[in-house]
Amino acid sequence: MTPQLWGLIVGGFLPALFYGLSSVFAKTSSNAGMSVGGHLFFIGIAISVMGGLFNLFLPGNVPSIAAAISSAMQGILWAMGTGCVVLGLLKYQVPLAKLVPLYNMNTLVTAGLALMLFAEWRDTDPVRLLIGASLIVVGGVLVSGA
């Protein structure tokens, strides 16, 4: 297997599986009466443990304050998104199956920003990109409205 394929499996397929499974646990947690703050608190503990394990088995350096701030911003934004998902589940009783397709349109936000900020537009087929983005939006709207 090529390194590129391994990268797609490790960085693409496995996160999709883990994020998908994690959403099921968000629903079971909210069904059990967990508050949004409590949910994020226990997620934070679990993330800290996993960070320690990754650092133990795949040690690395913190190269700069800018890198640390970027990692912290990812955590803050991820926690805000996760808190909103749990709030939608708890307060508004929205079915998980309808929320997931909508919040997973985050791929369009990430792809758009990566195209602009990291100049990834140079290596992108714009026609395929627009077709794929359209399918994501249509699919998300259709599934969330089902």
Image (cartoon, rainbow, N blue to C red):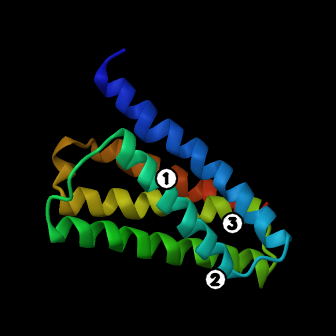
Q: Secondary structure at mark 2?
A: helix
> What's under tag 1, amino acid-wise?
Met
Query: Which residue occupies the foreground of this view, 31 or 49?
Result: 49
Which residue occupies 48% across, 62% down? Answer: 48
What is the x, y in percent for residue 104? 55, 59
Per the rendering, the mark at residue 99 is 3
Does residue 51 appear anywhere in the picture?
yes
Of the image marks 3 and 2, the number of the one nearer the N terminus: 2
| Dot 2 alpha-carbon crowd within 10 angstroms: few under 14, some 14 to 19, many 20 or more | few
Q: Is residue 27 above or below residue 81?
A: above
Q: Quadrant of residue 16?
A: top right
Q: Is residue 71 above or below residue 118?
A: below
Residue behind mark 2: 37
Side of 61 where 16 appears, left or right? right
Which residue occupies 75% across, 74% down? Answer: 89
CA gap, disc 3 and disc 2:
19 Å
What is the x, y in percent for residue 15? 51, 45
**Which mark is nearer the camera, 3 or 2?**
2
| Dot 1 alpha-carbon crowd within 10 angstroms: few under 14, some 14 to 19, many 20 or more | few
Q: Quadrant of residue 36?
A: bottom right
What is the x, y in percent for residue 25? 73, 58
**Which mark is nearer the camera, 2 or 1?**
1
| Dot 3 alpha-carbon crowd within 10 angstroms: few under 14, some 14 to 19, many 20 or more | some
Per the rendering, the mark at residue 139 is none
Residue behind mark 1: 50
Side of 112 where 42 appears, left or right? right
Kindly indicate whether the residue at mark 2 contacts the one at mark 3 (C-beta within 8 angstroms).
Answer: no
